[in-house]
Image (spheres, grey):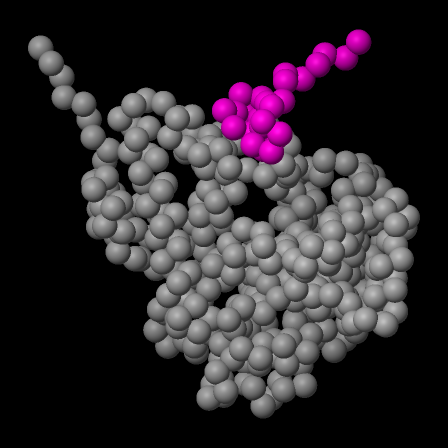
Amino acid sequence: MPLNVRGIPFEVPSYSLTGDILSYQRCGLQYRYYNGSSLPPSRPVQMWTGEFVHGVMEEAYRIWDLKRDQLPFPWSCEITPWGKQAPPGRPENDIGTLGDLVEARLAAGGKISRSDKARMAAYRRAAAAVNELGPHLFPLVTAAEEKISGTRAMPPTAQRVGRGDRYELTGVVDVISSVRARAHEGNELVKLASAVVDPGLENFDLIVDYKAARRPDQKSEYWTHHAWQVQTYAWLRNQAPGMARVGAGIIVYVNEFAPSSSELEEYVHEIRQGAADVVPEPGSADYYAIHRWQPGAAVPALSLAFRMKRAIRVIDVTDARIKDAVAAIDDVVTEIEASAQAEFQSGSIPKHWKACGDAATCEACDFKHTCPSPAQMRTTGKKAGPPVAPG
């Protein structure tokens, strides 16, 4: 006799802003394989740098908060050689010591750096962020790694899938800063944020999000997606009773404190294309250092003021911006729900999840050789062949 097909179970879907929304926007098919199938990446190194930087910043704030003025900046950074034991006698606030703790924690979860070169770069950037951003950021921090969540009406087109009329949205904010404008008017971050904060807000919260990445150009999808993420964090935070209103968001692009040669090359290209929003002042030392630099040469020493401008991005969280951001998140949820339903009905994954990763995303993906539309094919019209065996 015919048997009925079991439908998708009724539930309130839960979506993480980073684990689901941003991952899907990076590449829908990769998201499905890793998240939908609960398959861990065979090379989790692509996760390592971001989690390492977040971990070091959190540990540095914890140490600073315990003793405050007793640990003046800059802090030392003695890096333990790969696979070696740290020598005794380091100060507790040595960034290399904090990095050892974070590395051990990540290694226990199977996450290691892809190379010693990448590891050293992560230490340089984390140390620069602690020493150059920490004096401005740490005095403002009132909460770190704070989980926030809320529910939204399921978009009408997604409701037809039958998984409920609402969905949960979750996130983890790296830093919440409760600011009294007059008390912190000399703080560099508060000065930057004041450009978008409602002048009528005497007390407000700042949301700070770290990105272990370079500042994207204004034409990049990442530029838009990062803003949506922070604006949606603001929406979630504003729903909590008894909380001060979020006055602004701040994204910290940690790589800008110590850019690599390849990142500087990308930046020079963006300047020439008119896509960079922060450029050096004509005639300044930074201007000549960047415009005279040639790929392959050592990265020039850029001023702290300029690197800070590149690293700090202030996000407008007015009601209109937030409304647009959460509407965009609703659209992403609709796409995910529709893809899940189409896959359920047909039994095919590749046909219903869009492959849209950029070259860097594809390079780190376990499924690039079987992908129906890798970045190389979308840009050249030719699909990359299988890996060639050595010899």
* In the displayed structure image, the side of residue 116 where residue 237 appears, left or right: left
Q: Is residue 251 above or below residue 110?
A: below
- Give the residue at x 85% y 42%: 81
Residues 209 and 82: in front is 209
- Give the residue at x 54% y 68%: 315
- Location of the N terminus by quadrant is top left
* In the displayed structure image, the side of residue 166 where residue 205 appears, left or right: right
- Give the residue at x 74% y 51%: 269
Residue 19 makes an appearance in the image: no
Q: Is residue 251 above or below residue 260?
A: below
Residue 198 makes an appearance in the image: yes
Q: Main secondary structure of the magenta part?
A: loop
- Give the residue at x 26% y 26%: 345
Magenta stretch?
366-391
Q: Position of residue 351 (x, y in %)?
A: 39, 26
Residue 161 in magenta stretch: no
| Quadrant hosting residue 58 | bottom right
Q: Position of residue 340 (x, y in %)?
A: 33, 34
Q: Position of residue 233 (x, y in %)?
A: 45, 62
Q: Is residue 115 above or below residue 213?
A: above
- Location of the C terminus by quadrant is top right
* In the displayed structure image, the side of residue 43 where residue 303 appears, left or right: right
Q: Position of residue 39 (x, y in %)?
A: 49, 29
Residue 385 in magenta stretch: yes
State how many labels appear: 0
